[in-house]
Amino acid sequence: MGHRLSKIYTRTGDDGTTGLGDGSRVPKDSARVAAYGTVDEANSAIGLVLACPLPDEVNTLLTTVQHQLFDLGGELCIPGHAAIEDADVDRLEQQLDHHNAALPALKDFILPGGGEAAARCHLARTIVRRAEREAVTLSRLDAVRPQAIRYLNRLSDLLFVLARVLARADGHGEVLWHHERRRR
């Protein structure tokens, strides 16, 4: 690893710019900063899920995802850098299939909830969806590898399935949307 931060504030961002991983400076509200910032936010939300009691398999999976999200943030922060590969997306799909196999088919929409861990997982899912949108926005302005966008798309799907798994594991069950409630 390169140099470590010994001083947290530098004052270099006081002018509304921030440094990218390649040393260039961009406005703090640029599409690139929004994309990797939202990936960081998603990583923090997954940290909130990990702060709950979880099945060991889910804990291990989400810890791995956190490392990959950190890599993905680096990829988005360093123009031209590659960190997420097709194999990473494939592994998410395998986990998605594995965890979804034991769940009943969906017949109704699910509301975010189902216990604390499941609710936190739903929150992480929505933040990952926003990160995906931010990455797509960035891709219209600058190069973004398709693996990054595909990874975020599969991750949000995986978090949805994990929220279902966690709602059942906690004994709370899923919170179903009652669409008939508005009909009179």
Image (tube, rainbow, N blue to C red):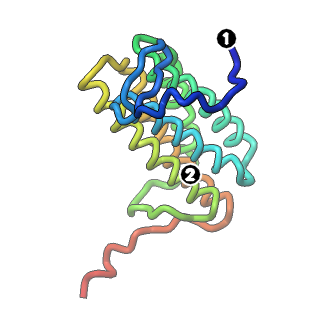
Helix, strand or loop for disc 1: loop
Which numbered mark, 2 or 1, is in the foreground of this view? Answer: 1
Percent x, y of residue 68: 58, 26
**Quarter that holds the N terminus:** top right
Which amino acid does the dot numbered 1 rest on? Gly
Q: Which residue position is annotated with label 1?
A: 2
Residue 110 sits in which quadrant?
A: bottom left
Helix, strand or loop for disc 2: helix
Which amino acid does the dot numbered 2 rest on? Cys
Residue sitting at the far bottom? 184
Residue found 75% across the figure and 42% down from its top = 56
Sequence-first tag of 2 and 1:
1
The number of numbered discs placed on residues in the rendered structure image is 2
- Tag shown at residue 65: none
Dot 2: within a 10 Å radius of its alpha carbon, few (fewer than 14), some, or many (20 or more) residues?
Answer: many
Q: Which residue position is annotated with label 2?
A: 121
Percent x, y of residue 61: 65, 35
Task: Indicate left or right for 138 with 171 as reference.
Answer: left
Task: Indicate left or right for 128 with 99 as reference.
Answer: left
- Is residue 22 placed above or below 62 in the rendered structure? above
Residue found 46% across the figure and 20% down from its top = 20
Dot 1: within a 10 Å radius of its alpha carbon, few (fewer than 14), some, or many (20 or more) residues?
Answer: few
Percent x, y of residue 64: 65, 30
